[in-house]
Image: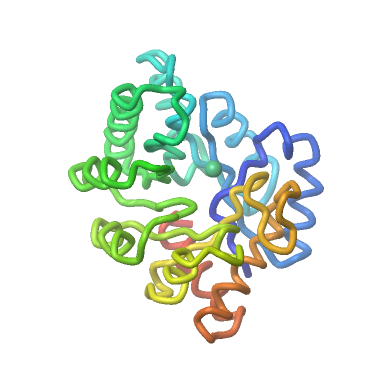
Amino acid sequence: MYFDTHCHLNSEQLYEKRADYVRHAMDCGVDHMVVVGYNLKASELAVAISHEFENVYAAVGIGPEDCLDTDAEELAKLEALLTKPKVVALGEIGLDYHWDTVPPQKQKAIFRAQLELAKKYQQIVVIHCRDAMQDTYEILAGAGVKGIMHCYGGSVEMAQRFIKLGFKISLAGPVTFKNARIPKEVAAKLDLKDLLIETDAPYLAPTPLRGKINEPANVVYTASEIARLRGVSVEEVARQTTENAMKVFRI
Ligand SMILES: [Zn+2]
């Protein structure tokens, strides 16, 4: 009944025991998930994993922290993945100004090139945005694609602007953190029809598991906190966010 819209079973921390994590998730009612790529190798792995398990899907893309050496040849290899079975999105892609590893100009160029690919193959996009809200918004506003703002950390007002562009807002573990005033406000105030839930596993384990390796089963904690903040049942949050995810990924 829960849909983890963003996890990395393709990461070093989770890959080896991926079958255990998938089984544990299913046992906890997390019966759908999308494994998200962040570079070419992780994207290829995401596709392979999606073919190993039922109800596990893949997103393929080159993220802002991994695009320093991305060239036309690498983009062509990514393009070839976009039409594989069970690939439901292009991502994660976007801008990250938190670390200084890749110059913003390069990040923007690779972001734009992948938005063009999304348009060409009519894929939705999964957006990674960190300390780059305004630039991300400006690029998406002119891109003509729809998708998901993953692990959204901005304001309610900014969320409404992304929603107007055709984006869903995905909330992760941070909404459960005690001092996360703004994510809690986003969880409480947006229309439930615009929200998705995710773990971003192995990162960002929710309270009460903070600091541990995160896994898809833990998306339940995020759903519970959203339900508490909205004064509705966790079943309703699970049902509506799953319906939203099915719709946006066209499953
Ligand atoms: Zn991610």
Q: Position of residue 193 (x, y in %)?
A: 40, 72
Q: Is residue 57 above or below residue 3?
A: above
Q: How many marks?
A: 0
168 left or right, relative to 223? left
Quarter of the figure with residue 206: bottom right
Q: Nearer the viewer, residue 6 or 230?
A: 230
- Of 167 and 208, nearer the camera is 208
Where 80 sits versus 211, above or below?
A: above
Q: Nearer the viewer, residue 31 or 15?
A: 15
Q: Position of residue 7 (x, y in %)?
A: 60, 47
Of residues 117 and 210, which is closer to you in this image?
Answer: 210
Q: Is residue 62 left or right of residue 109?
A: right
Q: Residue at x 43, y 18 (%)?
A: 68
Q: Residue at x 58, y 35 (%)?
A: 47
Q: What is the quadrant of the N terminus in the image?
A: bottom right
Residue in the image at 30% along x and 43% along y? 136
- The colour scheme of the drawn protein is rainbow
Which image quadrant shows ligand 1? Answer: top right
Residue 49 screen position, x and y as percent: 66, 38
Residue 18 x/y as whole percent: 75, 42
Name the residue at 63% across, 54% down.
55
